[in-house]
Amino acid sequence: MRHQAVFFAGVLWLAVLLAVAVLSVGRARSTTERLVALDVAVLVLMGLLGLGAGAVRRSYPLDAALALALLSFVSTLAAARYLGDRRPFEQPEGPGEGGTG
């Protein structure tokens, strides 16, 4: 019985954190703040998926969490690179490359 109470408290806590993270995505003023808030929301969602996998004793939620983690990693890299130099998929030009000389 005690394990169920701790499990329920963990799910409730992660659900509250997810709601706060989603609200912070909507209330963020800059794109960088939105990116960080979205990463936090995805991280909390992966925690909920992990707890869900333990509840149903299946690995499907863990597979979904792994896929979500990979997609989140790639999208964060692309978004950060885009925010950094506005070219997400091109190599930045070095000092001697592509110049006028």
Image (spheres, rainbow, N blue to C red):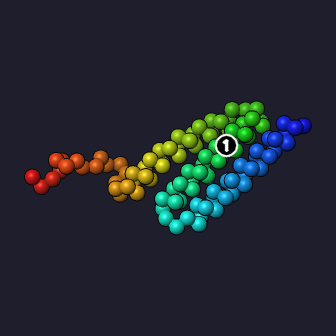
Q: Is residue 87 left or right of residue 4?
A: left
Kind of residue at badge 1: Gly
- Residue drawn 72% across and 55% down? 16
Answer above or below: position of 41 versus 50: below
Q: Which residue is mark 1?
A: 47
* Coordinates of residue 32 in the picture (x, y in percent): 48, 59
Asked which secondary structure carries label 1, the reply is: helix
- Residue drawn 81% across and 41% down? 6
Q: Is residue 62 left or right of residue 74?
A: right
Q: Quadrant of residue 23?
A: bottom right
* Coordinates of residue 5 in the picture (x, y in percent): 85, 42
Answer above or below: position of 44 versus 86: above
* Coordinates of residue 31 in the picture (x, y in percent): 48, 62
* Coordinates of residue 84 in the picture (x, y in percent): 37, 55
- Residue drawn 67% across and 53% down? 18
Answer above or below: position of 49 versus 21: above
Please rate how many residues cluster around mark 1, counting C-alpha atoms within 10 Å: few if below 14, some from 14 to 19, many from 20.
some
